[in-house]
Image: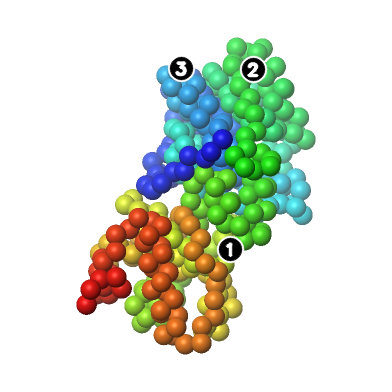
Amino acid sequence: MKPQNITPPIPAPDSVLSASTPESASLRISTRSVVCIGTFDGVHFGHQAVLRDARGAADRLGLPLWAVTFHPHPKSVVKPKIAPPLLTLPEERVALLGAYGADGVLTMTFDDALASTPAAHFADSVLAAALRAQAIVVGADFGFGFRREGTSRFLSDWGAQRGIDVHVVDLVAVAGQPRPVTSTSIRELFAHGRFSEAVELLGHPYPVTGRKIAGAGRGKEMGYPTWNLELDNAKLPPPVGIYAAWTAHAVPRPAMAYFGSNPTFGGTVKRLEINVLEGSPDERRPREPIESVWLESYIRPEETFDTADALIQRMTEDEHEARRRLNCPAGHTVEGRRHPSSAD
């Protein structure tokens, strides 16, 4: 199978009903519902198969689709020494689950109490009572409850006893890949710097959210003003380098992004720098203390330059390439700087 990539605009988290407890989710459900459940870290191609199946069931039954997910990652509680970094922070996951069809998302806090909850009690209290599930869709490798006793077979038997349809979606693979798509396989690609392959398995641009921090102001001096983000420690950082990207504003803007430590100027701390390519100065400024971008395509690795002029020349080439990949017409004026392809 081949992933169907989502292109901007990707909905903001507040465009999807969101709840943090089963009780609060229950208040938002006036009928029965269709439920899909999983950690959904990355909301990758395999997760999208679950969501497609669940969305189809919801449409046939005329019911809302609720996705149930967990934060922090369950392994951070049950096996903290091998807990993986996150492909998606909670707000990123909510946005993506909404983009792939969920009407509501219940993000449950995964703690020792939830880890020790028997599968039958979780299914009765959350899936049946709170969410009023008429149908449930899960992936073949999903497990829940104490010691993951809630296997897909357990859930199917539980549902049959209560008149709740349970559908188990097989693991899926992308054409040309030797094994099914999993969050683990995508993290492995990141670890080896294979961003393009990772994005193919994700089926969408890679979301990166961080806290806005002050920069040194060099970008503006060089004609490439940037805003800078410090990434959450729980987030799996992208490979160091230059990217074609989109802002996550209500009206997404094409951008050029750089993740690295600025070795040309002796930097040592990695951060994400974003140069927005279109829009008025006000439209291109970060709006909130916490901002997000979607990394669409990897352009090149980080380099160290002998002079600022050499860096500017390379940034000009990077802008050409970012605009080409984002299908962003050349010649736009950005804060008084004309695109290099424009005639003087």
Q: Amino acid at mark 3?
A: Leu
Task: Say which quarter of the image contains residue 98.
Answer: top left
Residue 306: percent from left, percent from top:
51, 87
On screen, residue 290 above or below 23: below
At x 59%, y 32%, the residue is 37
Q: Which mark, by number, is residue 61?
A: 3
Q: Secondary structure at mark 2?
A: helix
Residue 12 in view of the camera = no
Label 1 or label 3, whichever lies nearer to me, is: 1
Inspect this view and state whether residue 97 appears. Answer: yes
Q: Is residue 207 above or below residue 280?
A: above
> Does label 1 or label 3 sit earlier along the sequence?
3
Q: Secondary structure at mark 1?
A: loop
16 or 100, which is in the foreground? Answer: 100
Residue 164 is left or right of residue 184, and the answer is left
For the N terminus, the quadrant is top right
CB under 8 Å between discs 2 and 1: no
Q: Which residue is mark 1?
A: 239
Furthest toward the left, the residue is 344
**Which residue: 68% across, 42% down?**
178
Count the numbered circles shown. Answer: 3
> Which of the pair 116/82 is nearer the observer?
82
Alpha carbon of mark 2 to alpha carbon of mark 3: how far?
A: 17 Å
User: Which residue shows up at 57% across the image and 57% down it?
Assistant: 195
At label 3, counting other C-alpha atoms closer than 10 Å, the crowd grade (few under 14, some 14-19, many 20 or more) is: some
Please name the residue that numbered disc 2 is placed on.
159
Is there a contact, CB below 8 Å, between mark 2 and mark 3? no
- Circle 1 packing at 10 Å, graded few (<14), some (14-19), many (20+), is many
